[in-house]
Each structure stands twice: as C-alpha cells, then as structure tokens.
C-alpha cells in the first residue's frame, strides 16, 4: 500500500512528459476516480508539480449533484486549490443522454479553461473505463480503431485534455482515498442497468474468474493501439505520395490510390472526410465500403457531408453543398469549422455558402482551379441577398479566406510530415 501512491504519481508525471503545464485544470465530480486524481495531483503539486484549478460540472440531472459539488469545493478549500462549479441545463429529455452530457461537459470545461488561462485539464478515466469501453465497442463489432485504447490526450475547444490515470484501476485509486480517510460520492446511475456502461461493468465482474479483468482488457486495448499506430504511419506515408490539398479540397491520384491496400485506402479516405466535414466520427464501415466501390468504378458519390468527384486521373473530395446550406457566421469567425473570412468592415455582412445563385454572380469563377461543386460549397460574404465577395471564386473585393486547421483532424499536417 505504501508504494501505491508513489507508483501512481510516477505514472501521472510520465503522462505529461517533459512539457508539463505550469497551470493544470482537474475535472472532479466527487466520485472516487476524480477525487483520487485530485489527491495525487495535490501531492505532486507539493513537490514541484503544476498549480491546480479544480472544476466540477453539475449537469442538473440529480438533486444530489449540487451537494457533491459543494463537497469537492470544501476539499479544495482545505487544500487551497481554486474550485469552480459549472452548470448545464441543456437536456431536452430526448436523444442519447450520456452522449449529450459528455459533449456539454467538455464544452463547458474547455470554455472555463480558456477564460481561466488553464491550458490543460486532467480527467480521471481509468483502466476500468478502458475495459468497459472495449466491451461496449466489441458488442458493436467494432474494428481496430474502436477497440484500441483511449487516447492519452486530445484537443477540445483549444484546450488539451489528458488521462493521466488511464493505467490505474478504480480499486487502486480507491485504496489511495481509503489510506487518506477521504470519502467519495457514489452516483446511483452507476448501478442503473438501463445504461450500457453499467451492464458492461457487470459483465466484467462475471469474466473475472477467467482472468479477463479491467487491467487485462486495458492491456489488450493498448496492444491494439500500438498496431493502429503502425497502420497510421503507413497511411501518412501513403498520403504524402497520393494526396494534395487545393483550397480546402483533397485531391487523390487515382492510379496511385488503386495500388494501395484497401485498408490503407479506407483509412486515408476516413481522414480526408473528417478533415473536410468536421464530423466527430467517420462514416460507418458499410457506407464507406459502398462509396469505395463506386469510386473504383469511376462514379461520383456523396457521403458524410462530403462529395467525391471522380475524374480520369484524380479523385476530388470536397464539401457537400447541402451540408453547409443555411450555415452562417460573422466575418472573422470560423465558418464550417475551418474557414475564416476577413475584409473591410461592413454592416450586416455574414458569411454563408456561395451556392448556385452566388456562383452566377462570379464572372471570374472559371479562372479558379476549383470545379463548380466545390465553389458552391465555398464560403462567401453576403449582405442580405447581395453577394459582396467570394474569394475562392475569384470575387475578392478586398476579402480573403483562410483555411484554419481543425482540432484532432489535420489532413494538411498528415501530408506535410
């Protein structure tokens, strides 16, 4: 027991690497995992670790949540750690509650971190979470990506999120708390079998006599992640040889593409789709397989908010016009998650898709290297129904369009590295 906190602290420090932040946010719900993470990070802080800022998200779904947030606040006050409680009231009562709550939670925390000046937030996902996720995805017949280990870090809203106790089990973290005499809150939904994760947790208990435990499945997921890394390296090599970017479109050499292994081609297309569409997840396997067959036959198809235009020598992947219809932003803001338009100050100007109507008002559009399908889905500046500018279609009028990299999906970096 005496060596456990030291070992976990070593794991935590290793998760940050040499470029550890001076200030670190910690997501603390009041449950055992996050309270143990806070405890271990506080120990690290006392020996030269980063300054800590704790944050709790009250989803407003349980009456006990407010008291749990206050419990965390009292603990933080005793340890002189600044603490903030964030509130979510966006649940409509329909749809996937766990997914909606997760999206809201990370969005709220990212906004809080940006305002607080905290560049990174640690979250307490454990080996148990890893194993439960593995089983849930296994039930959906997931492939290599779905079964691979959770990412140790990722970006959301310009903030780095980290999982520094991903290799620790829930029981190990609870031992730390018991050793300090620190209690924790048990969320009653963790025993509600209406939730898939709870059922996966129960299955793990059943499998334990066979030696199939959380740590075992977490190790398997890690092995699969290593295999995925090797394949991703091959995808990056292929991308540099067959792909190029043209004004936000991805162009692929069809001859070179046909020589690739189907799995490399599939992953290459997935990465291009995610970069262009900004979707959280790639298209489902069967849909992508059908698209690949159509592409191989020389047909043009639409998929996942993207349009695939097959020509004799090239395959162009562009944004689908219908996917951006009605999407607006103010000048200077991101439009469609990756375009930022700048120009002279104009009252009432908005950024929206050029569309067919706007394209007719671009006399120099044929000087552009982009086909009409790409231009119709490109950003333009409008004042009411009047077209002011369409930089990608040759109608600049003092405006420029800058392509901004997407978080976690940067096809340009894949090609250049």
Image (cartoon, rainbow, N blue to C red):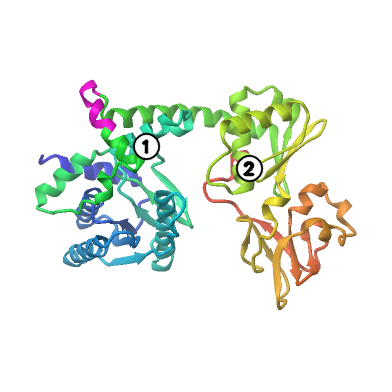
364 horizontally vs 236: left or right: right
Question: Where in the figure is residue 59, as x and y percent of width and height?
Answer: 35, 60
Instruction: Identify the main secondary structure in magenta.
Output: helix
- The residue tagged 1 is 133
- The residue tagged 2 is 304
Q: Nearer the viewer, residue 358 or 98?
A: 98
Looking at the image, tell me whether mark 1 or mark 2 is earlier in sequence order.
1
Question: Mark 2 Cα within 10 Å, few/some/many (few <14, many 20+)?
Answer: many
Distance of mark 1 from mark 2, alpha carbons?
Answer: 25 Å
Q: Nearer the viewer, residue 22 or 327?
A: 327
Q: Which mark is residue 53?
A: none
Residue span colored magenta = 203-211
Residue 390 visible in the snapshot: yes
Tell me if residue 95 comes above or below residue 333 in the rendering.
Answer: above
Q: Nearer the viewer, residue 132 or 417?
A: 132
Residue 207 counted in the magenta span: yes
201 horizontally vs 251: left or right: left
Q: Residue at x 68, y 44 (%)?
A: 306
Q: Residue 250 appears in which quarter of the rendering?
A: top right
401 horizontally vs 63: left or right: right
Outermost residue toward the right?
363
Question: Where in the figure is residue 71, as x and y percent of width and height?
Answer: 20, 63
Q: Residue at x 63, y 41 (%)?
A: 273
Secondary structure found at label 2: loop
Question: Mark 1 Cα within 10 Å, few/some/many (few <14, many 20+)?
Answer: many
Q: Residue 84 appears in which quarter of the rendering?
A: bottom left
Q: Quadrant of the N terminus?
A: top left
Question: Where in the figure is residue 391, as x and y percent of width and height?
Answer: 77, 60
Question: Where in the figure is residue 372, as x and y percent of width and height?
Answer: 82, 49
Q: Residue at x 36, y 55 (%)?
A: 121
Q: Quadrant of the C terminus?
A: top right
């Amino acid at each position: 027991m005496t060596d456990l906190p030291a070992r976990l602290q070593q794991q935590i420090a290793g998760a940050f690497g040499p470029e550890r932040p001076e200030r670190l946010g910690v997501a603390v719900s009041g449950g055992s995992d996050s309270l143990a993470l806070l405890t271990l990070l506080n120990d690290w802080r006392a020996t030269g670790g980063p300054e800590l800022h704790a944050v709790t998200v009250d989803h407003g779904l349980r009456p006990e949540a407010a008291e749990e947030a206050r419990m965390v606040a009292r603990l933080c006050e005793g340890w002189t750690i600044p603490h903030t409680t964030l509130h979510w009231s966006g649940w409509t009562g329909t749809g996937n509650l766990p997914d909606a709550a997760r999206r809201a939670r990370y969005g709220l925390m990212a906004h809080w971190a940006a305002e607080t000046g905290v560049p990174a937030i640690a979250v307490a996902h454990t080996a148990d979470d890893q194993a439960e996720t593995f089983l849930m995805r296994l039930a959906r017949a997931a492939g290599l990506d779905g079964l691979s280990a959770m990412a140790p870090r990722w970006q959301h809203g310009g903030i780095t999120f980290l999982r520094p106790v991903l290799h620790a089990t829930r029981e190990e973290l609870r031992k730390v708390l018991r050793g300090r005499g620190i209690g924790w809150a048990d969320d009653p939904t963790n025993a509600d079998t209406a939730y898939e994760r709870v059922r996966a947790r129960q299955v793990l208990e059943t499998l334990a006599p066979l030696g199939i435990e959380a740590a075992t499945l977490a190790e398997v997921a890690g092995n699969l992640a290593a295999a995925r890394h090797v394949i991703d390296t091959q995808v990056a090599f292929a991308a540099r040889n067959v792909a190029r970017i043209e004004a936000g479109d991805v162009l692929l050499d069809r001859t070179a593409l046909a020589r690739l292994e189907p799995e490399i081609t599939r992953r290459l297309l997935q990465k291009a789709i995610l970069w262009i569409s900004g979707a959280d997840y790639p298209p489902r396997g069967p849909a992508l397989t059908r698209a690949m067959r159509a592409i191989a036959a020389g047909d043009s198809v639409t998929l996942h908010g993207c349009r695939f235009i097959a020509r004799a020598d090239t395959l162009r992947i562009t944004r689908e016009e219908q996917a951006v219809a009605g999407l607006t932003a103010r000048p200077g803001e991101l439009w469609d998650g990756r375009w930022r338009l700048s120009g002279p100050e104009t009252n009432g100007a908005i950024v929206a898709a050029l569309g067919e109507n706007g394209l007719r008002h671009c006399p120099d559009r044929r000087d552009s290297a982009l086909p009409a399908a790409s231009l119709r889905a490109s950003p333009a500046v409008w004042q009411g129904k009047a077209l002011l500018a369409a930089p990608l279609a040759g109608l600049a009028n003092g405006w420029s369009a800058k392509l901004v990299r997407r978080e976690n999906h940067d096809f340009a970096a894949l090609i250049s590295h």
